[in-house]
Amino acid sequence: MLYRILKDKKRIIIYALCTAAVVAALSMMIMICTVKVNLTLYIDGAQIGSVSDAAEVEAIRARVIEDVSKVAYGQSFPACSISYGFAEGSKASDTLSEGEIYRAIYVSVLKNYRSAYGLYVNGEFVAANADSSVISDAVAEVREAAQGEDNLEVELTGTLEVRSLYYPVASLRAGSEISSMLTQRAGELYRTVSAKGSSIVSVDIDASEDEIKFFGSDGGQVISSDTGDDGIVTVNIKVTETVPFTTEYRRNDDLYVGTYEKTQDGADGEKEVVYCITYKDGTPVLREKVSENVILEPIAKIIDEGTKTKPVTASKDKYIWPIKDHFDITDTFGGRTVYGRYSYHYAIDLATRAGTPIYAADGGVVTTADRNSSYGYYVIIKHDNGQETLYAHMQSEPLVSVGERVYQGQQIGEVGMTGYATGYHLHFEVRVNGEKVDPLDYLPER
């Protein structure tokens, strides 16, 4: 009996030890599986910081390439080199934010590019220069080349466009090169409207001697006539002719390059011209201008030619949705009841996952990038037409700064729920003349 009890006790101890060993092993495995090993991110060989997920970095790089394509010329961009190492002893709080990774990749992708002004003829890129006045001078020279030595009046038949983008350093050209390239295409861009010079004399030069007295029927007046011993007749006739108006081009810094605006209509003048017509055997053989006198000065037509470069950040006067990923409109503009209290909602709420990129609905200037208890982190953009858009409850500090010009579709932050918010969403406002209006009246249909 005692032997059996001891034997059972030994078996219980063995079972207990085995169970403890299994529990310890499982605990160790759970600890190992839950330990997050961070990575050290290197971009073009330079150490940037710790990241938790390589797949997330690749997704951010793809987004950078997409965004860069909107501000840089061309579709192929030098791929930055991305590599990883183990970040020993790093904490989750030490990892780079999505915005920091985005900025580091963005700078690397554009390292061989430079902010400049690109000239396009009929939609085709010609060259770029960092100075917009160089482009303006080249445009003026090509028009002068089209006018030629006779200073003909010409009009633009092609399209000239200047875009403010990032261009490869290799595409930048000196002013003389751009002028030469454009001058060679003068015939493609301009056509002659009319030549400056005297108009056709309104006298019937084929009239016989007997018809001289009728010259006045065409607006001419016979002043005198003389018949020589050789039978040659000379007749002096005064006629009224048109003095064509000229066209003057003036540079206007308030208009964009390639834009022309008529600021004054032209009007023809008048002049009196005396011609001496010589007849032999009744046939006119010679016509000479004796004198002319301007009796009504012409008025020049004035056309302002733009010299201002339109930046890519200029407003397009129509909005895009500030969220491109899937979202739900969880609250609209107007009255609502929240927690039993009625209030008026001056915006629309776009609910989506945390960290979803927020984009500028149109180009403009960032006038506010701040945080308060109501909006949390928020941004206000003032557009060229005076309207404003507001983006609130961002997850962290905005990706843009006050005074910075942003282009339509540029990422300015990430969806969060800072401030007074009950869930992850973007609070989006549109303001016209300072008054908050329904954004759905200004956004395109989904």
Image (cartoon, helix red, strand yellow):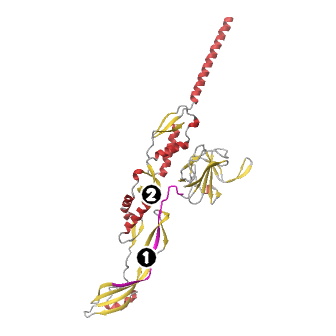
Q: Quadrant of residue 121?
A: bottom left
Q: Residues within 10 Å of mark 1 (few under 14, many from 20)?
A: some
Q: Quadrant of residue 21?
A: top right
- Disc 2 marks which amino acid? Asp
* Percent coordinates x, y for residue 314 in the rendering: 52, 57
Q: Nearer the viewer, residue 36 or 209?
A: 36
**Left or right placement of residue 376 versus residue 230 in this view:** right
Which residue does the image show at 50% across and 57% down from the upper left? 311
Q: Residues within 10 Å of mark 2 (few under 14, many from 20)?
A: some
Depicted 148 relative to depicted 40: above or below: below
The residue to which callout 1 is attached is 245
Res 391 visible: yes
Depicted 412 relative to depicted 277: above or below: above
Secondary element under disc 2, as helix, strand or loop, is loop
Depicted 328 relative to depicted 222: above or below: above
Extreme residue toward the left, this view: 230
